Amino acid sequence: DAPQVIGKQDEQGTLLFPSAGALDPNHIALTLSDRILERSTPKASSETAALSQLRDRVGKLRERIESAGKIEESLSRLPYFCAGCPHNSSTVVPEGSHAYAGIGCHYMAQWMDRSTAGFTQMGAEGANWVGESFFSKREHVFQNIGDGTYFHSGLLAIRSAIAANVNVTFKILFNDAVAMTGGQPMDGPLTVPRITQQVRAEGAGEVVVVTDDPNRYQGENRFASGVTVYDRKQLDQVQRRLRKISGVTVLVYEQTCAAEKRRRRKRGRFPDPPRRIFINEEVCEGCGDCGVKSNCVAVLPLETELGRKRMVDQSACNKDFSCANGLCPSFVSVMGGKPRKAKPISVGTLSFDELPEPELPQFEKNYNIVITGVGGTGVITIGALLGMASHIEKKGCGILDMIGLAQ
């Protein structure tokens, strides 16, 4: 007889595996085990023992899954843009406009006050609007796309939108790093001038560049013809003008990834402004406009006798300074100052003679450790040190680094 082949459904049409979402390994194991146990007839004692062992393992697996489902999360935190992240500014759209998300850290704009909803797989950013536009009363949308995605395959979606002649402004977010997966360098020679040349050659209409430092491009002659460079403070008026233009327009927003800035500054490879921003709590009225202007996680609430005020967390601040864009008299700029730190202790002055041995945990099986923290502050390094310590003590060790999406 020919073997019977089933897939997403069994013989009666009952769903075995979901057609959407992720396939969970535990669910696959249980489904396959149930099929094996239902259709297996042991012909020898060895087969009976094997089926009995499988039945026991399935039962234990079900117990683990059920018990895991009963565990309540004691601490849950929604990821957010890093302090000083360029996406805090670049993903804002004018009032009345709508934006689509894409693959990258800017995906998180969907749960912020950014009028952003909907996303595609990597490289298809904008293709959804090509299909939707013919059935929508909306005349124009903004489409966010990261520089890494653009370089990988996103240009094809821009080419498709140009061929379909839909009204869309692609915002290419050039942050000089593959930020979501840990800050790797771009996989090729991509520059802002080269992007403008490429999209113009594909047939894009107006192409503009918005940056946090327009002086960087003074005298730059490699841009496509007609490209204008604007300061990021002009982003709103630039977007309002672009949304009125028919066809495909491109806005390249250039600002280095905040987490990458932090890394490079530690290594002396990126300018470190001598300026630091502080908030005078005696002047602050707690309106929160600094948080609205910057969308920055380094702007923290400060509880005082006179109510809630605001403060800047100097250890988290990446010197973006957009929090100071509001009309607020409480902001103070300190030039050349540095946060006070404890004086380092010389190792030669310490005595380790009476240092007690640590109390080691007693365990017979694997021991799991979870290290949490904000990206760029040494979380990966701590894991590497523990792994090497385990290796030195001739213990087995496995390390899984969840890098990227730092906040």
Image: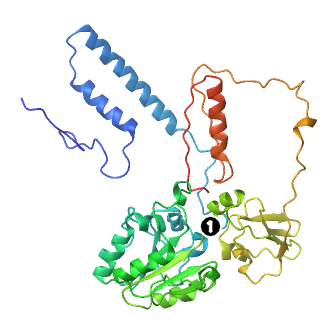
Res. 161 image quadrant:
bottom left
Which residue: 69% across, 52% down?
Answer: 377
Which residue: 46% across, 90% down?
Answer: 226
Left or right of residue 8, residue 221 in this image: right
Q: How is the image coloured?
A: rainbow
Q: Residue furthest top?
A: 45
**How many labels sit on residues?**
1
Which residue: 75% across, 76% down?
Answer: 287
Res. 60 image quadrant:
top left
Q: Residue furthest right?
A: 349
- Residue 323 versus residue 207 in the image, above or below: above
Q: Residue 147 appears at what percent x and percent y?
A: 48, 68
- Residue 108 versus residue 217 in the image, above or below: above
Q: Of 29 and 234, which appears nearest the observer?
A: 234
Quadrant assignment for the N terminus: top left
Q: Residue 23 appears at what percent x and percent y?
A: 36, 44
Q: Residue 191 appears at what percent x and percent y?
A: 50, 72
Which residue: 62% across, 67% down?
Answer: 85
Left or right of residue 172, residue 376 in this image: right
Q: Residue furthest left?
A: 1
Q: Which residue is mark 1?
A: 85
Q: Of 347 and 105, which appears nearest the observer?
A: 347
Q: Residues within 10 Å of mark 1 (few under 14, many from 20)?
A: many
Q: Residue 348 appears at what percent x and percent y?
A: 90, 36
Left or right of residue 236, residue 265 in this image: right
What's the residue type where badge 1 is placed? Cys
User: Circle 1 sits in a helix, a strand or a loop, which is it?
Assistant: loop
Res. 80 image quadrant:
bottom right
Quadrant assignment for the C terminus: bottom right
